Amino acid sequence: MVIGTVQKNKKAHGRIKTVMIEETPGMMGGEKMPEREEKSASPLDMSMNQMEKTYSAYVEARQQVERAYHENEILVNQASQRAEKRAHDSFDAAVAKSAKRREEAFSRVAEAREAAVREAEESFKSDNEAAEKDHDEAVSQAARERQEMLEKIWKQRDENMEQAWNIYSRMTR
């Protein structure tokens, strides 16, 4: 495949020599290409050579554009992947931070609950002891009052019985 021509300024028998450059299989860009000499350059040959050079330059430019596009596509892809990773990392960090805050809040609430339960139990215990003490005092007071009342009743009964006996004994005499 011919990919370009080069004109040499050597004159051989009054004519300009044109060298054809051919691509060989397995050649990469930047490698030196073998040259093929042609015998003479007529205006048609020169025009064809110029067209081949132009086409070769076009193909080279197109390949450069394709390489640049491909490189740009790779760079854009890498930038997108980095941005996506940053977004995922940011999300993961926000979730971890939120989970940590939730755990801290849960710990504070659990501690407050435990403190409230302890306080309520202490309050219940002291209130229960106070109620038990009040009950015992009320029962003791009621028992004393009952005893005093019973003593008064028995005393009154004894007095009434003695008075009745005195009245009866006066009558029977």
Image (spheres, rainbow, N blue to C red):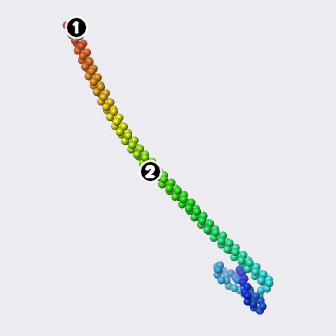
| 68 to 13, vertically: above or below | above
Calculate the distance from the C-alpha at mark 1 to the C-alpha at mark 2.
Answer: 93 Å
Q: Which mark is residue 128?
A: none
The residue at the point 36 percent across, 37 percent down is 127
| 85 to 163, vertically: above or below | below
The kind of residue tagged 1 is Met
Q: Which residue is mark 1?
A: 171
Decide if residue 55 is on the left or right side of residue 101.
right
Q: Quadrant of the C terminus?
A: top left
Q: Which mark is residue 107?
A: 2
Give x and y (percent) for residue 50. 76, 80
Report the residue that reaches farthest toward the left: 173
Report the residue that reaches farthest toward the bottom: 13
Q: Quadrant of the N terminus?
A: bottom right
Nearer to us in this view, 145 or 39: 145
Give x and y (percent) for residue 162. 23, 15
Give x and y (percent) for residue 18. 74, 86
**Which label sits in the foreground, 1 or 2?**
2
The kind of residue tagged 2 is Ser
Local crowd size for mark 1, using a 10 Å CA cut-off: few (<14), some (14–19), many (≥20) = few
| 31 to 160, vertically: above or below | below
